[in-house]
Amino acid sequence: MARIKQGVFSWEDVLAHRYQNNKPTALSRSRRASAISGRAQTEKQSVPASDWTVQAQSPLLAKLSPELRLMIWEMVLGGMRIHIVQQSNRRMSHVVCPLTDLCDICRGDSPQPAKEKFRSIGNLLALPMACRQIYRESIYLLYTMNTFEFSNTWSLTYLRPTIPPDLWDAIRDVELRWAFPGHWLPSKDPVKKVYFSAGRQQWLETCKALTRMKSLQSFTLQLSGSWFCEPVEKIPIFLEPLRDLNLQRGWNLQLPKQPYYVKQIRNIDGDLRKRGIDCLVRA
């Protein structure tokens, strides 16, 4: 909870209080336990597709082979870049990226998209929720075949408790963009110090959640020039909480496209490797 001082409310208190108050409602315990009768992942791994009960009344399920059905599910549910956003009512929503220069969120012009662009997370589940068999065949494709992009540090930790743990652990590709102010780094500046404590805690929680994602294969952290403008020697301090993020191919750090960072890429890369932070630095 927010740290309350007797008779005094600092900006740190306000930020911490806002972080707690904006948290969405977590998935109920019964829904976590059931997740559509349960452990779809266990069933998916232990029961061959050929042994699933065929619904004879459904031409789609009765006449098409499992291989063809999986191709259809992949086309419907895969290959998307999904921006995770939060509505004013604290509910988590998404915007499917058009994968063009027209995307306001990718350009950083509109971190909070127009209301009509919001889509409930449940809308992505329309196909899997059609019936139990389609759910078993398709649900993990939604989480394994898409990129989940978070343009706000809070969004990743907010999303986690709203979906079943086994589906969260199925996510393979994550991007974090632009919402990392440099004033979260230790500083002697009294103005920056105001924000350090509250902001740092949220960053640590985000890093902790990332390092515990069991199926994560690809991760990109993009620092935007509009926020991040710290000297290169402070970058390893900022990234220290990601030391335990050990991916098979490492992860990507995208620095602002400023001459200062472009010239220092080699030094930054060497500094990070000395500290045991395995990432590919780009600008």
Image (cartoon, helix red, strand yellow):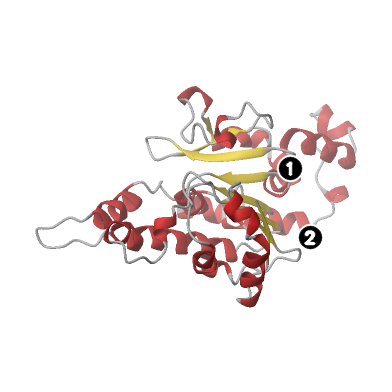
**Tag of residue 46:** 2
Left or right of 276 on screen, residue 249:
right
The correct choice, above or below, for 140 with respect to 185 in the image is: above
Contact, mark 1 vs mark 2 (Cβ under 8 Å): no
Q: Which residue is mark 1?
A: 138
Residue 112 at x, y percent in the picture: 46, 33
**Nearest to the observer: residue 275 or residue 6:** 275
Q: Residue at x 44, y 52 (%)?
A: 181
The correct choice, above or below, for 206 with respect to 22 in the image is: below
**Element on which disc 2 rests:** helix
Residue 124 at x, y percent in the picture: 62, 35
Closer to us: mark 1 or mark 2? 1
**Element on which disc 1 rests:** helix
Can residue 55 be seen from the camera position used here? no
Residue 138 at x, y percent in the picture: 73, 42
Say which amino acid is labelled 2. Answer: Ser
Say which amino acid is labelled 1. Answer: Ser
